[in-house]
Every structure is written in structure tokens, then in C-alpha cells.
Image (cartoon, rainbow, N blue to C red):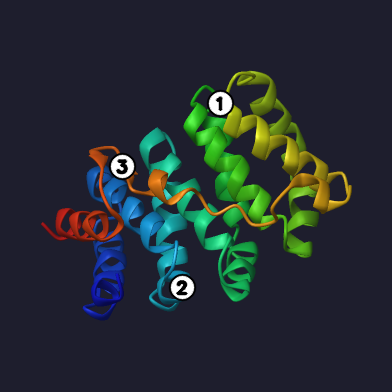
Amino acid sequence: RERIVREGAVGRVVGAMEQHPWTEGVQVEAVGAVRILALEHGAALAEHGGVPALLLAMAEHVTSPHVQEEGCGAIRNLAAGDEAVRRLLAGSEGAGAVLVAMKGHAWHAAVQEEGCAALRNLAMHDNCRRRLARKGAAIVVRAAVKGHPAHTGVQRHGKALLESLSHRAQEEAGPALQVEDRSRAHQTSSGRLNLEAAAVSHTHRVLG
């Protein structure tokens, strides 16, 4: 993974996102690569402009459940990492992008799970938690919990987030930062890949 980063994959993926903002196929693959790289290289992504590129992709492809799922997953992983990256997301309407995704794809369980987990991580930042409360995030999350009663991930992250937003002790909500399971990070729309192969594959598809 370090070799991939050293060879400039982060910069190339972000560059492709910026060059092809309206091409859904490119954005799905690129945002998927960002989601994987964010597990360990959030700071590098932020340095290369990955956050605004990610938010633009979600805004331009708001009707695509694939872009929205990958985007929420990327925000989830970015927000679980470096505090500076979490502050950047909190100040750049990362939470707003997640709420839009959840409202627009209420039927899509994966979008709801990733959205709840992303908001849960963002809520660890005091300013972002207050902003979520003002934006009515609790209403969106309650709808997700109610709409997907049998989905373990939605229930776990949604209920934990609601506790956080209601100012209960965060220790009761379980682990503070919810990086997604690495085995799930490897799973893309085209199948299960290992972390390095997934990043390379996404990069090649974006650049191809």
C-alpha cells in the first residue's frame, strides 16, 4: 500500500475525479478507491484535494446509489482517521453530503448503513455534532433505523449516533471511531479484492 501511495496513486485518482466530474463510471471507481485508501492514507488524500473532489462527486451524482454508498463509506473512513481530516470534513459540509445521500436513497440499506456510520464518526467533532443537530440529522437517522429494522449495521450505527446527538454518554455507544471492517472495504461493485489489488484496480480503471 505504501508503494502505491509513493507512486502517486492518490494524486492520480483525485486528478481523474477532477477531470471527469460528470462521468458516473469514473466517479464510482474513483470514489471506491478513495474509500479504500482512506483507511490508512486520509492525510495524503486531504493533501491532494481528495475531500473537495469527493464531495463534488457526491453532489454531481446525487441520484447514483453506487456513488453515494462509496462516498459515504469514504467519509466514514476519513472521519475515523486523522483529527485534522475530520475537522476538514466538518468544515466542508461532509455531513451535509451524507444527509443528502441518506434522504435520496432511503430504501438503500448500504447507503443508510454507511451514512449512519459516517455521521457517527463526524459527530465526534463537537462543532459537527452541533451542526448535525441543527440540520435535523436525528430525523433522518430515525427514519433509517425505522426503515431497516432487520439490518444490523443500520441499527447499530444509527442508534449509537442518536445517543450521541442526544448528549448521552458516548461510552454507551461502543467504540468511538467506526472504521469499516477491512474485509468489507475490499468489496467493491465488481467483487472482493485485497486492499492493494483493489487500489491498483480502481486506479487503472479511473485512468483507463
Residue with the mark numbered 1 = 106
Q: Is residue 141 left or right of residue 63?
A: right
Give percent across and percent down for residue 52.
Answer: 46, 64
Residue found at x 66% / y 57%: 122
Amino acid at the residue labelled 1: Ala
Q: Say which residue label 3 marks.
A: 188
Residue 31 picture location, percent across and down = 35, 53
Q: Is residue 134 shown above or below 104?
A: below
Q: CA distance from mark 1 to mark 3?
A: 21 Å
- Categorize mark 1 by other alpha carbons within 10 Å: few (<14), some (14-19), many (20+): some
State the residue at coordinates (26%, 61%): 196
The residue beneath circle 2 is 46
Q: Amino acid at mark 2?
A: Ala
Residue depicted at x 33% and y 42%: 187
**Residue 116 position (above or below residue 154):** below
* SS state under label 3: strand
Q: Secondary structure at mark 1?
A: loop
Left or right: where 166 falls relative to 97:
right
Query: Where does residue 188 sit, x and y in percent of width and height?
Result: 31, 42
Is there any visible trace of residue 136 in the rendered image?
Answer: no
Task: Return the residue nearer the eye: 208 or 22.
Answer: 208
The quadrant in which the C terminus is found is bottom left
Mark whose residue sits in front, 1 or 3 = 3
